Image (cartoon, rainbow, N blue to C red):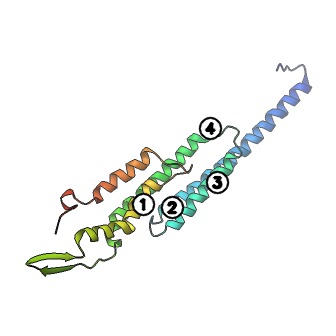
Amino acid sequence: MNITWDDPDKLKAYIGRLQEAAQKLTMHNRRLRKAHSEIGDIVVRLAAHDLVKEESKWTDGLLAIRQRLATEEGYVAVKANMRTWLAHWDRQLYKVLELQFQRGVESLLSQIPTINVQLVYRDQRMRLRPRLEEVKYALYQGEMKRFLTIPQRFRGTRGGGMGQQQESVSGRYSSHHRPHRDYQHTPL
């Protein structure tokens, strides 16, 4: 397009198009900033909620984030332009997940229900009733298993896995809560 000062009509039309484009860009930027702020508020609220005790609040928060991102995705011409923003929110969610997972690991023993075990002396042998394997199975199959698998089930903003971040959280903490190899199959 060739615009010169000699043609004021073309110049006015060009300035009008520039102003319209600037207005659209400003509106889009305001909408993105508002969405970014709203998502940030949700992530901060998630940091205050226990992963196990308040799982529904985590589910609702993640759903709200995904819906807000989907709304913004509708305004974007090229969906690939959102990848960096989505990756940013995945990292923020991962940080909050790791924080809550660490808090949960630290308080896990206090949340496990009491299991009564009897020490029985029979046939000149001491035995546990129920057997140790049954006790370990009962402990692991309940809340502990559900809690320790949260990082593997966490799907992030896009509904897929979070890759290395996910493996990092579960690997870092789950290795501390596996039974020691000497006690895994100890006969009684």
Residue 186 percent across, percent down from the top left: 18, 64
Task: Return the mark for residue 68.
Answer: 3
What residue is at 84 percent from the left and 34 percent from the top?
A: 16
Whether the residues at callouts 1 and 2 have beta carbons within 8 Å, the answer is: yes
In the image, 97: left or right of 144?
Answer: right
In the image, 42: left or right of 179?
Answer: right
- SS for dot 1: helix
Q: Can you say whether 136 is above or below 98 in the image?
A: below
Task: Return the mark for residue 46.
Answer: 2
- Label 1: few (<14), some (14–19) or many (≥20) C-alpha neighbours in 10 Å: some
Residue 75 percent across, percent down from the top left: 71, 45
What residue is at 68 percent from the left and 44 percent from the top?
A: 29
Name which residue type carries label 4.
Ala
- Label 2: few (<14), some (14–19) or many (≥20) C-alpha neighbours in 10 Å: many
Mark 2 or mark 3: whose residue is earlier in sequence: 2
Give the residue at mark 1. 100
What residue is at 61 percent from the left and 41 percent from the top?
A: 82
Q: Can you say whether 5 is above or below 82 in the image?
A: above
